[in-house]
Image (cartoon, grey):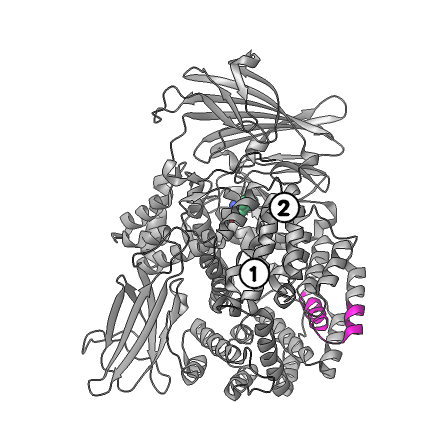
Amino acid sequence: MRTSQPQTIYLSDYKVPAYLVDTVDLRFELFEDGARVHSTLELRRNPDSDEVSAPLELDGDSLTLESVALDGAQLAAGDYEDRGDQLVVRSVPEQFTLTVVTWIEPQNNTRLEGLYKSSGMFCTQCEAEGFRCITFFPDRPDVMARFRTRIEANKDAYPVLLSNGNDVERGELENGRHYVTWEDPFPKPCYLFALVAGDLVEKRDTFSTCSGRDIDLRMYVEPRNAEKCDHAMDSLKRSMRWDEEVYGREYDLDIFMIVAVDDFNMGAMENKGLNIFNSSCVLASQETATDLAFQRIEAIVAHEYFHNWSGNRVTCRDWFQLSLKEGFTVFRDSQFSADMGSPTVKRIEDVTLLRTAQFAEDGGPMAHPVRPASYMEISNFYTLTIYEKGAEVVRMIHTLLGPDLFRKGSDLYFERHDGQAVTTDDFVKAMEDASGRDLRQFRLWYEQAGTPVLNVSDDYDADKGVYRLNIEQSIPDTPGQTNKKPQHIPFALGLLGQDGQPLPLQLGAGEADAPTERVLELTEATHLFEFHGIESRPVPSLLRHFSAPVRVRYAWSREQLLFLMSHDPDGFNRWDAGQRLAVDVIQSLVGAPDDAEIEPRLVEAYRKLISDTELDQALVAKMLQLPSEAYLIELADNADVPAIHRARDAVLRHLAGALKAELIACYQRHQDGGPYEVTPEAIARRSLRNTALAWLLMIDDQEGRELAVSQLSAADNMTDRMGALRALVNSGFESDRQQALDEFYDRFKDDPQVVEQWFSVQAASDQAGQLPDIQRLLEHPAFDWKNPNKIRSVVGAFAGQNLAAFHNPDGSGYEFLADQVCRLDDSNPQIAARLVTPLTRWRKFAPSYSARMKSALERIRDKSGLSRDVYEVVHKSLA
Ligand code: PHE
Ligand code: ZN
């Protein structure tokens, strides 16, 4: 554990590496009580470094050093220094070979960084700084080397031995052991290294590339999961084709492998040629995975695959550039998902996440730019800002350049930087050079943190037929940043006439053939736009498709929102108008007496929606979802969560009560006759039906109860089963709830991915997930403190989704979370640091809540031997 105070690392201190590594030769001897790692590095001084007499410093973490040799000669103890986190060799020649032998204990590695064991198999996780837990190495992404890896293990227990690249040799050894040697021809940073050893079944397929090469596709999973691979394999093939067609990117090795592991800190990892996935993000069958899981798996498989170019062939110079690969790759996977399903629905999902969670991050104590200027622990920077806001920034470049110039820019970027470790600035430069556009001001999106606010006001001059829009831009202060400069914002909009027709947007009087949608470019603190030839006061449709990650403030009337909900030709803005209306109605009820009137026009709008069979049903399904509690909290100051919860529930119950007949009709209309399919239409049908069910059970409707019980027993897929279970769990029908939960568990107890869903449906429910229930779940035999998914599905779901229970006015939810964070801090600091997040937002809440949250944070701060991960988050949020 840490002994000194964690240090801050600054982008401005970046220096090129003093030594480069050309090749890495690794030999792993895997045993039950540990592993011996023999590493032979070909090193040379970096001609670009001015540190001519710098000693060789290699990073290390939790390693037992056995020996060091220079050019074949063993070094004596005085010739090197083992500082624990560094191996220093003072005098080395210009070019040399270094051989280091270390001993590690994967079986005791609970941090899940480096080499560890998960359900009996060996696997690795090296991003960001896990490779140093395997051997001493310059663990930074701008050191790229060619790797050769030999793995030795017992043949019965570990018949499958995998690493990056191609398998070039295999053979038998004494004592029932065997070995396989892998060679990766592409130089790579060590964070992309991977190794897997286990008793796994192999699923094979092939993909024929655009240039006619046949790629061997292989998935490796535990035998019990053999039937859960098809969806990921199909997703992989679709991703490979799509990346060829849309970005001109062909796969480069002869083999592409995917492995599923149960214990994994994140979703998945793009190791070169050997992607490793959290089981929950890759395994699926109709019986065990919901539609949401199917879609998530397709997106994550694509994401990891796309990294082969955006991340691996062109990688990051340093970790401050993380969004170079993550923002771009999230943008790519969201384009892919949009192309595979409904673009409007995909946009709605992305924006929901961004506005709920990324905006909250940007407004909180951990706010940081897309390209941060400093950090203590890089693991804390795998954030919504780096990923989702980073993707929005790339999307804005796409909007500003248009698809053709954007493609020219990405081609130039890949061509210019293939095999290099580069910066976000190099990315923007390639876009500039290919398009001829000046993106100097645009670069502020990478440097300034905080969500820009656009204050929009308008007036209409009937005499002149002129409609004016005034837009003021400001960016709130964030930790360490004040007085920000205006950013370059693409602002898409349209205007609708009284009859709902889109109006031509004439920016100059008499402009011919004016388009009905424009992207205005905001660059100043204020802009005034005049639209000519407007015959009556229009309704503005602002920030269409959410063309920039900003908050728009405009004094919409409820009439205007209702009008946009049914007339806006932009599906995204139709949905958004509905959300704004619902937010307005709910907000007006927070703290109001129980019998306060609920906007009758909201009921009528929803009535129309539920019965609308013309509109894209996938959009209807989205429009029926009320804004989440988390989003309502994000929009509030001094949030009183139980009051917000009550107001939202009151609206939901009122809608359900008023629309009961329509809900039952909707349920019946969307009964699925045919076989289970994962098409956008079928997904929308199930979503509508399950929403109807959930609403009916919110008012403890008997008919709804019968529908739920029979759906639960008849379901042939997890979406419907889970829909019925969730509706019952959230209802007041206590005995049905318990029976349904018990039967469900009995049926699926041997499937960890389903048990995780079973945990989280309870932990996220205000009916089934009060603190004593949560305590009981932690005692359940299926719960496992070493498995991040289980922790997320109970503790994470409680604190992140069961908001009224977590924000119990007595502070018990906060104390509970603090206890769990302290307990996890020693075993898995990455997970502990992520779990703290809800507490870090303490300033957002009403005083009695925020005081209790703060004291829970202080208790964590005072724990002895706090990890660097948790230290950074807690100290920054208390500062
Ligand atoms: N690079 C991974 C991804 O975005 C995420 C990850 C980060 C996984 C760190 C593990 C550890 O696809
Ligand atoms: Zn990624």
Q: Position of residue 182 (x, y in %)?
A: 58, 30
Q: Where is residue 512 in the image (x, y as percent from the top left)?
A: 21, 76
The reply to whether the magenta stretch includes residue 194 is: no
Q: Is residue 631 above or below residue 784?
A: below
Amino acid type at circle 1 is: Ala
Left or right relative to 346: residue 155: right
Q: Does the residue labelled 2 lie within 8 Å of ligand 1?
A: yes
**Residue to which mark 1 is pinned:** 851
Amino acid type at circle 2 is: Phe
Quadrant containing the N terminus is top right
Asked whether residue 789 appears in the rendered view, the answer is no
Q: Position of residue 715 (x, y in %)?
A: 73, 69
Q: Is residue 183 above or below residue 483?
A: above
The residue segment tinted magenta is: 719-740
- Which residue is painted at 38% across and 72% down in the image? 553
User: Viewer-proximal residue, 633 or 844?
Assistant: 844
Q: Position of residue 859 (x, y in %)?
A: 61, 50
- Which residue is painted at 65% across and 73% down in the image? 690
Q: Residues within 10 Å of mark 2 (few under 14, many from 20)?
A: many
Left or right relative to 103: residue 333: left
Q: Is residue 63 above or below residue 400?
A: above
Q: Residue furthest left?
A: 509
User: Viewer-proximal residue, 79 or 462?
Assistant: 79
Q: Do the residues labelled 2 and 1 touch (CB within 8 Å)?
A: no
**Residue to which mark 2 is pinned:** 264
- Foreground mark, 2 or 1, reads 1
Q: How crowded is mark 1: few (under 14 residues within 10 Å), some or many (20 or more)?
A: some
Total numbered labels: 2
- Which residue is painted at 30% across and 68% down in the image? 472
The reply to whether the magenta stretch includes residue 723 is: yes
User: Viewer-proximal residue, 823 or 414?
Assistant: 823
